Amino acid sequence: MLGAEPRRRILELVGRQGFLDRPEDLSLYEYDAGVDKHRPDVVVFPRSTAEVSGIVKIANQYHMPVVGRGAGTGLSGGAIPAEGGVVVAFARMNRILEIDLENERATVQPGVVNLDVTLAVEGRGFFYAPDPSSQRACTIGGNVAENAGGPHTLAYGVTTNHVLGLELVLADGTVVETGGKELDLPGLDLTGLLTGSEGTMVLVTKVVVRLIRKPEVVKTLLAIYDNNEDAGRTVTEITALGITPVAVEMLDGVMLRMVEEATHAGYPMDAAAVLLIELEGIREAVDEQTEQIREVCGSSGAREVRVARSAEERELLWKGRKNAFGAVGRVSPTYYVHDGVVPRTQIPSTLHVVNEVAARYGLTISNIFHAGDGNLHPIILFDGRVPGELEKARAAGVEILSHCIAVGGTITGEHGVGLEKKELMPRLFSSETLATMARLKLLFDPNNRMNPGKMLPTGKGCIEIRQPALVKGAMRY
């Protein structure tokens, strides 16, 4: 509960228009795009780094949790205030501060929408590479917190590969800068450390990102399969060729039918799976690679391989892929998007396991994922209004992630750990490694007030493993 004095001071700092504390308003900030919920005590909308610093100083003085929030599109509970407190929403800090095309850099505030960076520079032949499916809504600050990926990161890398510098607010309100426009500054790589730390150490208030020149030519292929395991094997064969497309996306039959009914993107309704493959670069090289991939797809069981004949056709295919999660909402009242990673050679067998899990729990699970880097996104359809359905969906998700770990993979490729998967961390890391992570967090956040209850296990959850918990700057076993 927010006391009268901190409420007065925060309200004075941000103004009435930047302050929410009515229950009906707070209910809109108790969830993200995942399945967990918890209501904050107050939501504030700072307009500057100075205001963020002031908010954090007040929260620190009164021992209140602080949780940063971008657009709320996260899928692992990262922006959910698990222990209440102050949600710092960055919607007002949404300006592109500088575009420096000569040095291929841009400096933005955390509330800038991902796609807006590309829209600001594409007319001059540049773009921003990380492209989460939610890129029309998600923000750069949230992308930095979760180290977001996207379809085209197969060739370009995830957010950390495109963030060069940060301005940030520490847990005591101190403002510091890490990195910068320069490619490789001396000293510890604090920018790399804090990118992907899920808001558990700092609040980011400014980001320097790398811009990339647009390629000479882009070609998009749609390979169509009557067997989804053949589609999975094709990915391994493409890798064996030594070709790295900028994107290799897979949609299974359940998913592509939902997508096609919603978007009319041109996906075949009778297929078991499709691969959406994109190549870019110098025209001659792309033409040669296109023919090589056509041959591999055909020899691996594709019944047809189409090449988009125009930019409009290409955009329509990607519209289907990027709007897939929205298409699911037309079919199921609720759904649970998971995020695991397996070695590419394990994709076919993992798809088989996903089907087995679906049958065992009596659930429909569709698959759409970044096949090129083995980043799976099983989408578990269920009705949250039916008692026990959410629990079944959670249990099915744990089985799938457990299989990912067992075959040499991991529990997240781009969505983060958050609330959702923190109790699975001991299956990946030793107690000594987890304790080291906890000590590192406490260096930045001695009182454990920055997004508490995220990423590190507490021993409460679906598996009976007890690990060190953080309590007011001390390690508790």
Image (cartoon, rainbow, N blue to C red):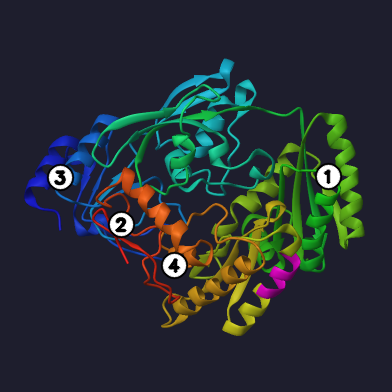
* Disc nearer the start of the sequence (1/2): 2
Measure how far apart labels 3 and 1 are at the Cα level: 56 Å
Asked whether 66 or 92 is in front, the reply is 66
Lower sequence index among marks 3 and 1: 3
Numbered mark located on residue 81 in the image = 2
Q: Earlier in the sequence, mark 4 or mark 2?
A: 2
Query: On residue 215, which mark appears?
Result: none
Q: Residue at x 61, y 23 (%)?
A: 123
Q: Is residue 109 visible in the rendered structure shown here?
A: yes
Q: Main secondary structure of the magenta part?
A: helix
Q: Amino acid at mark 4?
A: Glu
**Mark 2 → mark 3, Cα distance in angstroms:** 18 Å
How many neighbours does mark 3 have within 10 angstroms: few (below 14), some (14-19), or many (20 or more)?
few
For the residue labelled by badge 3, is the local secondary structure a helix, a strand or a loop? helix
Which secondary structure lies at badge 2? loop
Query: Mark 1 or 4 closer to N-term?
Result: 1
Instruction: State which tag comes first along the sequence, 4 or 3.
Output: 3
Q: Disc 4 to disc 2, how far (Cα)?
A: 18 Å
The tag on residue 423 is 4
Which picture quadrant has residue 304?
bottom right
Asked if disc 1 and disc 2 are in contact, CB closer than 8 Å, the reply is: no
Does the magenta run of residues contain 151? no
Residue at mark 1? 242
